[in-house]
Amino acid sequence: MRAEIHPTHPQKRTIGQAVELLRRGGTICYPTDTVYGIGCDIFQKKAIDKVYQIKRMKKDHPVAFVCPDLGDIARFAVVDDSSYRIMRRLLPGPYTFILPASREVPRILMMKRKTVGIRVPHHEVPLALLRELGNPIVSTSASYEGEQLCDLDDVETKFKAFRQIDMMLDCGYVDDTPSTVLDLSGDEVKVVREGAGPIDWL
């Protein structure tokens, strides 16, 4: 299923359809403030397995999840004062933060790790989904063999498993630059990946 969605004023009916799919354990492809993401409800184990199958990722490959605001981050990660100040300055925005995981994070997302990657994107579509769903959404970029896919036509062309994606939210062309990944789990901020978010403030 593919549905057009407005990037700044997402249609309530379309958001509702996507959220209903997520609650039933479905997967979606959706726009963010960087690239298209493939995701599911963080509490749907079979759906998480399906996301890994779609991307052909090994089980130890880390995925991030998106939250609607800083308050939700504190539920799933241990956030000290220094990390909070940094995130408050940069979010919502094109950053993924690696933080110590709390006990709220489902075990399937932990593997042998003690950290999680969390995003609060500056884009109305994922924020509307999150507000309606009430849970974070597991998220991995819609990339294929290292190539970031900028529109859903590319996703359908490249992914042999695209039919496993239950709904695609199409808002047209998006940027091909992924988020900047910052590790806040230690004593110093570490740049894991330089992407869309500037790091000149470091």
Image (cartoon, helix red, strand yellow):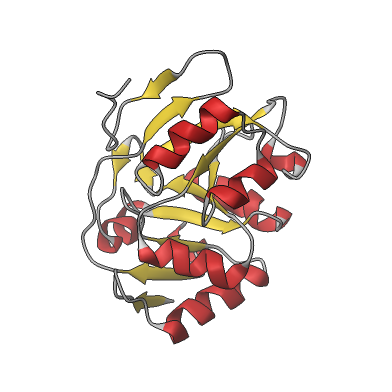
In front: 42, or 79? 79
Residue 81 position in % (x across, y down):
58, 29
Q: Nearer the viewer, residue 16 or 75?
A: 75
Determine the residue positioned at 53% across, 26% down. Answer: 82
Task: Say whether residue 61 is visible.
Answer: no
23 to 64, vertically: above or below: below
List the single residue furthest toward the top.
Answer: 187
**Farthest bottom residue in view:** 13
Q: Is residue 36 left or right of residue 182?
A: left
Q: Position of residue 166 (x, y in %)?
A: 51, 69
Residue at 61% over, 54% down: 50
Q: Which quarter of the picture shows residue 180?
A: top left
Q: Quadrant of residue 156?
A: bottom left
Q: Seen in the image, is 200 located left or right of residue 51?
A: left
Residue 90 visible from this viewpoint: yes
| 132 vs 155, nearest the viewer | 132
Tell me which residue sits at (57%, 33%) in the image: 62
Q: Is residue 68 above or below residue 11?
A: above
Between 5 and 135, the one lying in front of the other is: 135
Q: Position of residue 140 (x, y in %)?
A: 47, 45
Q: Quadrant of the N terminus?
A: bottom left
Q: Is residue 42 above or below residue 196?
A: below
Q: Position of residue 53 (x, y in %)?
A: 57, 48
Quadrant where the C terminus lies?
top left
Q: Is residue 145 left or right of residue 183?
A: left
Q: Is residue 82 above or below residue 156?
A: above
From the viewer's perspective, tell me whether residue 110 is left or right of residue 132: right
- For the image, the number of numbered tags is 0
